[in-house]
Amino acid sequence: MIGQKRYDGLRALAAAAAGRSMLHVNATAYGGGVAEILQNLIPLLRDAGVDAHWAVLDAPAEFYEITKKIHNALQGMKLDLSEAEQKVFLDVARENAAQLRQADVVLAHDPQAVALRHFAGARGAGWVWRCHIDLTTAYEPVWSFLRPYVDEHDASIWTMPEFVRPGLRMRRVLIQAPTIDPFSVKNREMPLAEAHEVVRAFGVDLERPMLLQVSRFDPWKDPLGVIDAYRLAKKKVRDVQLVMIGSLADDDPEGQEYLDRTRKHAAGDPDVFLFTNLDGVKDREVNAFQRVSTVVIQKSLREGFGLVVAEALWKEIPVVAGKVGGIVIQIQDGISGYLVSSPAECAARTIDLLSDPALRKRMAAAGREHVRENFLITRDLRDQLELVANLASPARKS
């Protein structure tokens, strides 16, 4: 799948990193792209000889309300943190830092884990902060609060150069986009007959075209705008259906609220289907829905990367997506999909694809090849092995 040359390169890197230890820390074990990446990446690191582990923050519900506020502020909302909120945020970091296991390299994911380094003390580890968020319009007061904790790391990882905040004071600033695992439950090959059986059980008509968005129910994923685009498309393609799937993640207290808002906006339309993990739609079901969809939509208003775009392209389904963040490095506009900036534009491009099977086929093939070259998990494994080999302290490398 990746070719002999890349395979040999991975083996060489694995030999250089063998015996080192690595700890990933994030906010939740389920829901969202980071947890999905780590579920698949940690076993691969272990297979490559790295003593890799994954820790999830232990925190009260109040902490996740604060970090959701931080997340929204970093994506451009003007939301200030009170002194009390800052204290809760830092108290959680202090308590969790005291419980961390020893490792040669610690990789802290996103704002939730950014202050761990500050409280961890001198443990001889190389510390990395990985930012999965688009910070191009970050609200400065909140970024200024986090910035000193970011700067204490030895390296940082960003999805795109455009996301990197100016003036970072660390030795390494790395650009590494997330990836998908083609052998995971969500992405592994599935016979079309099996996919049909799975989807049929949820009441979707497989004889009619289907639009699909798989995302958290979140204002940045624009679920209301997706419904608006579907309604415009339905004026031209009368039999089209819309399926929206989202997980209710442990670290996203807004999820249920936006699901309720989305349901209200759908206004009882029998051709709009809303599903979550609580309805039994998990990785296998998402795999099936993606494979039987006619067009996948990802109409984000902000997006760090958007794994679901790569997932759909890998399954050879054309994608219409917001022209934002990490989506723009996944879709070659007009070649492997379409990039759009409004519900009307989304609807127009969706109609083009619904009306032209040959166009769908051409874009699907181009999309799969683009993912093969750039966004498979073996590339992330390579980056991680290089990180371990380079950041593990000399004393612990011997």
Image: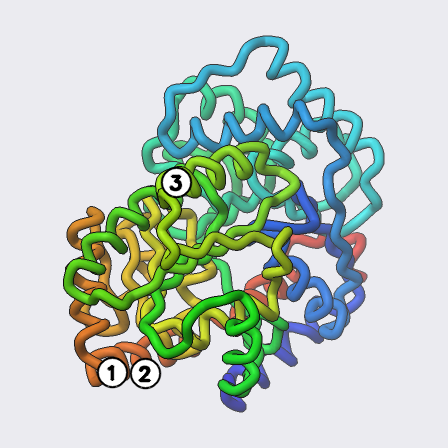
- Residue assigned mark 2: 365
Residue 116 x/y as whole percent: 69, 33
Q: Toward the viewer: 248 or 61?
A: 248
Q: Earlier in the sequence, mark 2 or mark 3?
A: 3
334, above or below 357, in the image? above
Residue 388 location, quadrant: bottom right
Mark 2 falls on what kind of element?
helix
Q: CA distance from mark 2 to mark 3?
A: 29 Å
Mark 3 falls on what kind of element?
helix
Label 1 close to label 2 by CB (< 8 Å): yes
**Residue type, mark 1 in image:** Arg
- Residue assigned mark 3: 220
Residue 343 x/y as whole percent: 22, 48
**Residue type, mark 2 in image:** Ala
Residue 26 x/y as whole percent: 66, 44
**Residue type, mark 3 in image:** Trp
58, above or below 364, in the image? above
- Residue assigned mark 1: 362
Please indicate whether residue 147 sits to the left or right of residue 351 in the image. right
Do we see residue 172 in this rendering? no
For the point 35% across and 56% down, the residue is: 298
